[in-house]
């Protein structure tokens, strides 16, 4: 009786109050015409009734009213939910239960290569085969290979390759384990649906994540693979269902796209350093590779080709080794007019196939285009080797081959590519590797695959690579495209990784004017805070008050600063060997600080080159001629045996990081780095400022740290003994400077060879350069003095040869020289 006495009157009163509120609220029609006071009163009553209803509900005093109002809605919701659940389960049975033939004849051709086990799993899996997520169970578990079978299958199955590489470490099962039989692995496929809220029109937003993971007792730590359900058809950049090697047509199509894009869009890849007279240079001979089906090729003289059309050719960069079986000689020059491709080694056969795949008619290979037993021809053609590679449309680099039989085509590393499991006309299902893909990992992959190779240790290959406008590196499991602008690889999401910049100097070797970078180096806040009034909205809630709030907006001063920064960086030199070479051939500097930048770029190249090996040590400078020739042709500088006449005060200051036992190259003067074997470096280096600060923002240093530079010698070149293509290879230097006994002051000595001069031989110090730069090691020193250690070569006291290098941070020797306490002497350096 309690509900009849209390709940019934309360419920009737509450329902009456709500009815009255609705009645009076529906009378006006257009609420925008009501006065502001009436609107406030109406919504105040609404809030009061709502509060009272909730309070009475918690006190259980109006259950009848609540039942009358919400009962029909609850009944409708339960009925609809039951019907929907039954429909979903029925459709799930019909769709998933019969989901065994989604592949179809058309999609089967375009899906990636899968083993029988993986293909069966994809066919059975509702999630992997592309069924809608709301028709399936959120988690699936599938029996898979054993560990041993997976390792074998990963060589040919794309999905197995990705799963195998997703495991960081496999655990070894102990003998006491109950699972001593072959370890079975499973694949866990799961769909996670996360509610993200409602959009502007009230529709539900969901974030769906479909993942795949390899599970098993032997799996130590496996990464989670992301399965993508793309709305579009998808565009896989490889066709592993046709070929597992790096010789497939998709590689050639990919390379052609990058070559065409580079030709049309990359200004720095036009090799403007080639002299005007050599713009249409062709080597003495070229290989005519013919058509795709031809089994014979021929050696042709370039003079016999049609000179009225531009002729493109590719050039091969490779390791000879001991396996080259066919070379061009005086005895077989007539036979090489036409010969079978099968008679060549693997490197050469693959190079012919690549040339045909890239739709180019001609190919240059050194051993087949230069008569090997004709010394006069070899000397003449080797002098033009730089032009051969600089003028080629593209260079084929057999990076993974240690000799001529290694070949360019090797099995692909499938795990680096996205695997297409299913593909339909309007959507696809793919799985991606869990490895990170960014600029750092891409460049690290390039370094590991393309640079840490046998070819990269060959001295002649240095200019073959860095003078080429484009290089296709056929590496172990992957192919790279490299040009003067970027590096790209044949991965699923391939994109060019551009070279970083050296902000402290322009691309032509000149320094940035202070007016350009002063404003850029000032700290500016990216965002500024302002008070903002929200705009009037038609909603009744926003008519009750005007909201005032603080918002962060982009700082206009910061925007202008970023524009200026981008402008400066666009004119800055690029880092790396290609950037160093660009600075050298474009050099327009004149000040001592700018000449230091030239010196550092030159020795950046020398350091990389000098660590490489040569079959004949007498080729030490010859294999570097192409680079020197092109720098000299584009500047007003004069090359002398590995150094530059205008930069002698800096270029003479080289050191040997790994000293050889003795000087084994007598044809080169002792003052040249080319006279010794070993990795060459210099002590005028400045540590490069990292472009990333805390992994977030980038900071740059534009101002030169070279404040005081004091040359202590004057030099000239006399008695030129050897010269090729206007490049001086051997000469004597006349030097006017200050000579100091080695024991006069405390100095640090670095000898050129491990075989030091006898103790009774008097050594002389020749100070070459003094400077003040707190960023040159040892950092923080007020002044540094660097020079050469010399030894007299005969009874004539003014003829010396270099035996080492010295440096000191003591200011006394510098003060003695600058204050004129010592007299200058003239000597000859051989």
Image (cartoon, rainbow, N blue to C red):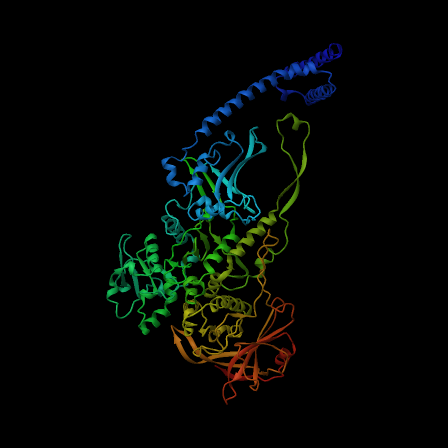
Which quadrant would residue 530 be assigned to in this image?
A: top right
Image coords of residue 212 (percent x, y): 51, 40
Vertical placement of residue 240 versus 664, above or below? above
Q: Residue furthest bottom?
A: 795
Residue 685 seen anywhere in this rendered image of the structure? yes
> Could you tell whether 349 is left or right of 791 in the image?
left
Q: How many marks?
A: 0
User: Compared to 130, does 698 lie above or below?
Assistant: below
Q: In what quadrant of the picture does the N terminus appear?
A: top right
Q: Position of residue 749 (x, y in %)?
A: 58, 77
Residue 303 at x, y percent in the picture: 27, 64
User: Can you give x and y, in whole percent of width and height, for residue 104 in the image?
Assistant: 38, 35
Residue at image x 27%, y 63%? 300
768 over 426 or under it: above or below: below
The foreground one among 195 and 282 is 195
Q: Quadrant of residue 711?
A: bottom right
Query: Which one is nearer the viewer's eye here, 688 or 363?
Result: 363
Q: Residue furthest left?
A: 334
Determine whether, in the image, residue 79 is placed left or right of residue 304.
Answer: right
| Residue 493 in view | no
Q: Is residue 622 above or below residue 60?
A: below
Q: Is residue 550 left or right of residue 750?
A: right
């Amino acid at each position: 009786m309690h509900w009849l006495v209390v709940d019934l009157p309360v419920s009737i009163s509450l329902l009456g109050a709500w009815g009255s509120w609705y009645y009076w609220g529906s009378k006006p029609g257009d609420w925008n015409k009501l006065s502001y006071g009436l609107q406030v009163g109406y919504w105040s009553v609404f809030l009061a009734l709502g509060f009272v209803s909730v309070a009475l509900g918690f006190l259980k005093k109006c259950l009848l009213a609540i039942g009358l109002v919400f009962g029909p809605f609850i009944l409708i919701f339960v009925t609809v939910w039951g019907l929907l659940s039954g429909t979903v389960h029925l459709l799930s049975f019909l769709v998933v239960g019969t989901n065994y033939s989604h592949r179809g004849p058309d999609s089967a051709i375009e899906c990636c290569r899968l083993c029988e086990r993986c293909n069966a799993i994809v066919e059975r899996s509702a999630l992997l085969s592309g069924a809608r997520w709301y028709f399936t169970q959120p988690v699936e578990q599938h029996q898979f290979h054993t560990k041993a079978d997976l390792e074998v299958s990963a060589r040919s199955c794309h999905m197995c390759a990705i799963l195998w590489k997703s495991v960081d470490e496999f655990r070894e099962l102990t003998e006491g384990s109950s699972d001593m039989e072959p370890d079975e692995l499973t694949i866990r496929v799961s769909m996670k649906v996360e509610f993200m809220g409602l959009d502007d029109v009230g529709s539900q937003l969901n974030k769906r994540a479909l993942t795949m993971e390899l599970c098993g007792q032997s799996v130590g730590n496996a990464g989670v693979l992301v399965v993508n359900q793309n709305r579009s058809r998808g565009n896989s950049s490889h066709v592993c269902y046709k070929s597992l090697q790096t010789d497939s047509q998709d590689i050639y199509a990919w390379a052609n796209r990058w070559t065409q894009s580079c030709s049309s869009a990359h200004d720095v890849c036009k090799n403007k350093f080639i002299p005007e007279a050599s713009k249409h240079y062709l080597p003495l001979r070229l290989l005519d590779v013919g058509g795709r089906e031809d089994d014979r090729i021929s050696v042709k003289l370039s003079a016999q080709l049609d000179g009225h059309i531009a002729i493109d050719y590719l050039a091969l960069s490779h390791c000879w080794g001991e396996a080259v079986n066919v070379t061009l000689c005086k005895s077989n020059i007539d036979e090489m007019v036409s010969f079978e491709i099968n008679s060549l080694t693997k490197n050469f056969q693959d190079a012919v196939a690549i040339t045909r795949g890239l739709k180019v008619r001609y190919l240059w290979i050194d051993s087949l285009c230069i008569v090997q037993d004709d010394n006069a021809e070899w000397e003449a053609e080797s002098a033009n080797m730089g032009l051969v590679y600089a003028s080629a449309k593209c260079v084929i680099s057999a990076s993974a081959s240690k000799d001529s039989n290694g070949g360019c085509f090797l099995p692909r590393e499938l795990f680096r590519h996205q695997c297409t499991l299913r593909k339909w006309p309007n959507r696809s299902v793919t799985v991606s590797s869990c490895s990170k893909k960014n600029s750092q990992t891409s460049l690290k992959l390039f370094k590991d695959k393309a640079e840490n190779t046998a070819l990269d240790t060959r001295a002649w290959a240095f200019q073959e690579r860095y003078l080429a406008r484009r290089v296709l590196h056929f590496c172990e499991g992957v192919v790279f495209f490299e040009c003067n602008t970027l590096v790209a690889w044949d991965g699923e999401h391939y994109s060019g990784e551009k070279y970083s910049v050296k902000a402290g100097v322009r691309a032509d070797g000149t320094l940035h004017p202070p007016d350009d970078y002063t404003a850029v180096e000032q700290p500016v806040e990216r965002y500024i805070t302002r008070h903002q009034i929200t705009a009037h909205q038609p909603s009744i809630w926003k008519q009750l008050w005007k909201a005032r709030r603080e918002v962060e907006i982009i700082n206009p001063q910061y925007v202008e600063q970023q524009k200026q920064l981008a402008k400066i960086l666009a004119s800055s030199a690029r880092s790396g060997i290609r950037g160093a070479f660009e600075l050298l051939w474009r050099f327009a500097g004149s000040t001592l600080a700018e000449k230091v930048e030239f010196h550092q770029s030159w020795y950046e190249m020398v350091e990389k080159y000098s660590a490489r090996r040569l079959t004949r040590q007498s080729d030490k400078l010859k294999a570097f001629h192409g680079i020197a020739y092109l720098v000299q042709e584009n500047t007003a500088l004069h090359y002398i045996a590995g150094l530059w006449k205008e930069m002698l005060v800096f270029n003479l200051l080289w050191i040997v990081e790994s000293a050889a036992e003795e000087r084994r190259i007598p044809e080169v003067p002792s003052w040249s780095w080319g006279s010794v074997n070993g990795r060459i470096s210099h002590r005028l280096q400045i540590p490069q400022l990292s472009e990333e600060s805390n992994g977030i923002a980038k900071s740059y240093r534009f101002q030169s740290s070279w404040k005081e530079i004091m040359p202590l010698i004057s030099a000239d070149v006399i008695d030129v003994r050897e010269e090729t293509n206007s490049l001086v290879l051997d000469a004597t230097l006349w030097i006017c400077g200050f000579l100091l006994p080695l024991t006069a002051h405390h100095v640090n000595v670095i000898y050129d060879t491990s075989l030091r001069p006898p103790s009774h031989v008097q050594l002389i110090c020749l100070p070459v350069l003094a400077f003040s730069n707190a960023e040159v090691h040892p950092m923080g020193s007020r002044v540094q003095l660097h020079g050469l250690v010399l030894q007299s070569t005969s009874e004539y006291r003014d003829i010396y040869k270099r035996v080492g290098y010295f440096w000191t941070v003591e200011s006394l020797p510098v003060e003695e020289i600058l204050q004129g306490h010592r007299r200058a002497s003239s000597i000859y350096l051989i």
